[in-house]
Image (cartoon, rainbow, N blue to C red):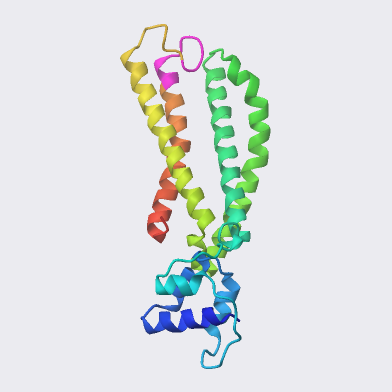
């Protein structure tokens, strides 16, 4: 055990902080969750071995620290799982969108060389990316139910924030493009999805993009505010 951890827990409890908050603070500061749990359940009346001073004691006192931040604060095992999960989500979402857009054009008889060239690759990417995302999503959700401090993992928070920004930009850009196409209906310059797309075709393409990007945005916006992890 580390002396500064015992000191931090004792002083934090004296200030009225709950063990859940204390553990979350330790994890955010870069300490291993299992070590934090061990300190919280230990008998703090016993003397602890002396250990080097780290950022936790300085964090409690408010003093600046020149000590390097532990690597675990940036790349925990769970943090890497979250990063991989969000990469798989991005691959699956983009691939699904390309497949659906291509399908709409094919059904409406619209020729689009771009979609014809990437539909096979997009299908393959969807087959690979979607199962990876679902596997990690279910695994991490189960882990979060057992340890609520995981929702405050720095890697998860950064990935969620980036996902919200990207999906919002994609969604609002698609709405702007759709309104622009309506304002310029009948002109040859408006040609987002092939040769002379119809009004209904353009609307379907817009709804597909909004369903994917908007659905992801809505889920993580609601989930993050419910957990207070933003």
Residue 212, horizontal then vertical, whole percent: 48, 37
Residue 173, horizontal then vertical, whole percent: 40, 28
Horizontal side, residue 193 vs residue 134: left or right: left
The residue segment tinted magenta is: 192-202
Residue 84, horizontal then vertical, whole percent: 62, 49
Instruction: Please report the residue visible at 45 percent of the width from the left and 36 percent of the height from the top.
Output: 211
Nearer to the camera, 108 or 221: 221
134 in relation to 21, above or below: above
Nearer to the camera, 152 or 177: 152
Identify the main secondary structure in magenta.
loop
Quadrant where the N terminus sits is bottom right
Instruction: Please report the residue visible at 49 percent of the width from the left and 50 percent of the height from the top.
Output: 158
Instruction: Please report the residue visible at 53 percent of the width from the left and 13 percent of the height from the top.
Output: 110
- Res 88 quadrant in image: top right
- Res 2 quadrant in image: bottom right
The residue at the far front in this view is 66
Total numbered labels:
0
Q: Does residue 194 show up magenta in the picture? A: yes
- Res 33 quadrant in image: bottom right
Nearer to the camera, 200 or 132: 132
Residue 60, horizontal then vertical, whole percent: 42, 74
Q: Does residue 189 show up magenta in the picture? A: no
185 in relation to 51, above or below: above
Quadrant where the C terminus sits is bottom left
Instruction: Please report the residue visible at 45 percent of the width from the left and 48 percent of the height from the top.
Output: 161
Horizontal side, residue 90 vs residue 174: left or right: right
């Amino acid at each position: 055990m580390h002396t500064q951890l015992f000191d931090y827990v004792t002083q934090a409890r004296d200030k009225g902080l709950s063990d859940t908050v204390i553990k979350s603070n330790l994890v955010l500061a870069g300490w291993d969750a299992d070590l934090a749990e061990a300190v919280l359940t230990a008998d703090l009346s016993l003397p602890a071995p002396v250990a080097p001073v780290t950022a936790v004691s300085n964090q409690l006192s408010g003093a600046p620290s020149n000590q390097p931040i532990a690597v675990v604060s940036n790349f925990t095992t769970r943090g890497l799982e979250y990063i991989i999960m969000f990469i798989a989500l991005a691959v699956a979402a983009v691939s699904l969108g390309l497949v659906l857009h291509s399908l709409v054009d094919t059904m409406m008889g619209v020729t689009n060389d771009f979609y014809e060239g990437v539909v096979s690759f997009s299908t393959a990417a969807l087959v690979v990316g979607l199962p990876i995302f679902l596997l990690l999503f279910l695994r991490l959700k189960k882990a979060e139910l057992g340890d609520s401090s995981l929702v405050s993992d720095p890697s998860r928070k950064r990935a969620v924030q980036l996902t919200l920004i990207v999906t919002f930009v994609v969604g609002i850009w698609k709405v702007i493009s759709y309104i622009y196409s309506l304002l310029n209906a009948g002109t040859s310059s408006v040609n987002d999805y092939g040769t002379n797309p119809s009004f209904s075709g353009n609307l379907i393409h817009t709804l597909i993009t909004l369903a994917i990007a908007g659905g992801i945005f809505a889920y993580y916006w609601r989930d993050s505010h419910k957990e207070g992890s933003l």
